[in-house]
Amino acid sequence: MGNRQSTATAPRGAAPKSARSTSSKKQAPQIDDRYAAFKLAIKPSKIHRWGVYAAEDIPARRKVIEYTGERISRRETRRRSEEQGRMIYLFTLDSYWTIDGAVGGSGAQYINHCCDPNITTTIRNGRIFYLSRRPIRKGEELTVDYHFARDIEKYPCKCGSAKCRGTINLID
Ligand SMILES: [Zn+2]
């Protein structure tokens, strides 16, 4: 553990290794509507634990939600990613800063990985925005490609898409 993504657009999602969190699984987390441009809902997901779903139709190429959280340094990122028994929601902003969605997250940190996602990421002025790659229908789960680095521990992917590369990590 202790690995970080090397690319700027690489959120460190809910690492399966940390899934033995003891926190309540019955109470669904909430979307912070201040950061969402469309109606979204958090519900159990077939991909992993919780997922974020469109509660209304979303057109292509629109801002959907901002990924918020505490801004932490490289050293603090390393410390938190090595903590056990805790869900990891670290999004690498650049070579120094990481956003920890576990602290002050908008709910975007619950968006699961998919190898053929309907959400894409853009970073503007140090803020992370999730945009729709294509039209998303009401009821669809939102997904984003976590782009885990090639050179870190391999996380198997169960996204179920026809384009699944078998791992959340990028491959050549
Ligand atoms: Zn996949």
Image (cartoon, rainbow, N blue to C red):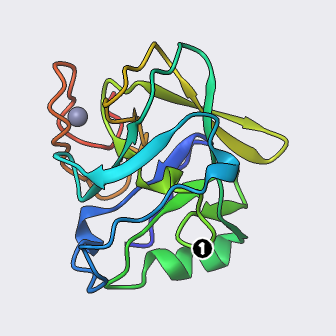
Q: Where's residue 119, x and y in %?
A: 47, 29
Indicate the position of residue 11 as horizontal and vertical percent values.
50, 50
- Residue shown at 42% from the left, 42% from the top: 146
Give the quarter the ligand 1 occupies.
Answer: top left
Q: Is residue 35 above or below residue 86?
A: above
Query: 107 above or below 112?
Result: below
Towards the viewer: 7 or 164: 164
* In-front residue for pair 160/98: 160
Residue pictured at 32% horizontal, 35% vertical: 141
Query: Taking the image as drawn, is residue 93 in sight?
Result: no
Q: Which residue of the protein is positioned furthest toward the right in this rendering?
A: 125
Decide which of 28, 101 is in the foreground and name it: 28
Relative to residue 116, is residue 7 depicted above or below? Answer: below
User: Which residue has dot 1 on it?
Assistant: 103
- Does residue 33 show up? yes
At 41% from the left and 47% from the top, the residue drawn is: 41
The tally of labels here is 1
- Name which quarter of the figure residue 82 lies in: bottom left
Q: Position of residue 103 (x, y in %)?
A: 60, 73
Residue 135: x, y in percent?
Answer: 45, 13
Q: How many residues crowd around disc 1 within 10 Å: few (fewer than 14), some, or many (20 or more)? A: few
Q: Is residue 108 left or right of residue 25?
A: right
Q: Amino acid at mark 1?
A: Val
Which quadrant would the C terminus be assigned to in this image?
Answer: top left
